[in-house]
Image (spheres, rainbow, N blue to C red):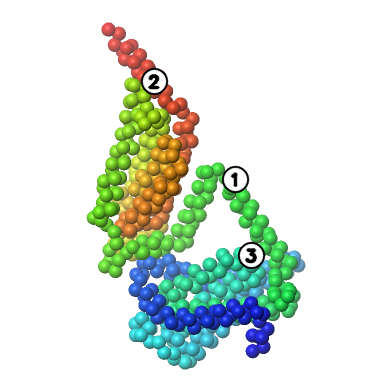
Amino acid sequence: MTFFNQLNSQEKRISIYLLIGAFFFLLFDYSVASFFDSINHQTKSLFGTLTHFGDSLYFFVPTILIWGLIKIIKSKNQIMETISDISLFIFLNILLSGIVTQISKHIIGRPRPVLYNGFELKSLDIIQFDSKWHSFPSGHTATIFAFIFCMIFLFPKIKNALITIAIIIASTRVIVGAHFISDIFGGTLVAYLSTIFISKKLADKNKLFTSENDKLIPNNNVEIISSNIANLYQNIFSLYLNFNFYFKTLTITLLLSIVFFIFPSLDITVSGLFFGQDGKFIASESDWFIYFVRKMLLPLMALLVFFVPIAAVFKQIYYKEKILNIAVREWVYLFSCLIIGTGIVVNSIFKNLWGRARPNDTIQFGGEEPFTIPWLNVDYCSTNCSFVSGDVSFFTLSLALLIIINKTSWNTFAYASILLISLLRIMEGDHFLSDTIMSFIITYVIIKGLNDIFKNFPEDLNLNQLKKISWRFRKDSNPD
């Protein structure tokens, strides 16, 4: 009890809250486990990937390598020594919490959700070596929270973001059916107490922490590292803000592409949310609203965007008049966005040449073709393929329309329509999330680029001069 008596009031309060949480959620453990057991495996796909971030190996290897490398080079730099101490702090904390967790698991012998969902087993089996009886406490949760608590103790200014990350990863243990909610609280409590214990030991040796008013605070060297990291972040963000539109968009596109590359199951999880137990997506073209949007409204809008600019050109040439008091330059701009953006780039190039199978056709959703990540040029679809979405591209043209009618204040409605059509296409199983996002980005860049080009042209595009040249040519070719 000596260790517990050394806890300050805040540490005792947090420990009690975690303990109460573990007991409280015992009331809901089995109903929550049954709920997540009923969810299809496609929806759990992303969480099955994220849950591995609670594997201690991901932390043991880099921390011991960093600590060992600094010791080998025998650096006398105080900041390098502090980094070495931080690595050791993380390593020892995860090690201690892991040992406590494993001992507790073997002694308590609580059956995992798989045993409850399959056989309705609830009773404990004391001293159990079968991993199916190692539910309490959660080891992955103890690992990720041990790491996160180390970071919070060292860099308290970003504790909210860190706690959010830990909660997301810990919750995946419940979603994939490996643990109950109360197991998560148990693992968190072990990690918290372990962090306090290790940090106090380091403070006693004047490493990383100093004591102030019965509280441990980071020492000066840790504060210097924290300040340097904050300055680096501010410099990078300032550099990004100084980029023009195209470099900013390129940066965002690269970051999103990296996310979809590292977490390819993100696409499967989002689509899985709309995949029913009957093996079909919950929406289809036969639904009246989808039929109205895609088969009636969209074709009508496409015809208007195609023919109205043509009519505007002829009216300008022959009558020197505008349609809806909008300059012919603006109509031609809208027409160009349709032809170049949605027509050539999206539909002719990407959809016909990239060959990504639609969700409905992939093995994950009952089809025969493999799932692939965005931007990967494959041959699993011959024409009109999944990457990227043509419908989303067309609805993105609404932003160009609002530019020419000088109603950019209505952009919120345009974005809402783009989100709606994106959702509908995902619900039908015709597109992945990445298809819709990249379609919007590609089309939006073309809209912006063409706008930058066309605003340098005269409003009438010198079409009246073109008419005079054409009339003179006909007169010269017919002298009689």
Q: Amino acid at mark 2?
A: Asn
Q: Nearer the viewer, residue 86 or 467?
A: 467
Q: Give the label, 3 or 1, closer to the camera.
A: 3
* Horizontal relation, residue 360 to residue 416: left or right: left
Which residue in the rendered view is the most extreme toward the left? 286
Residue 184 % position (x, y): 50, 77
Mark 3 = which residue? 157
Image quadrant occupied by the N terminus: bottom right
Q: Amino acid at mark 3?
A: Lys
Under mark 1, the amino acid is Asn
Residue at horizontal 35 percent and vertical 51 percent from the top: 421
Q: Quadrant of the C terminus?
A: top left
Q: Which residue is mark 2?
A: 464
Q: Are marks 2 and 1 in contact (CB under 8 Å)?
A: no
The secondary element bearing badge 3 is classed as helix
Mark 1, residue position: 242
Report the residue at 48% width, 81% height from top.
24
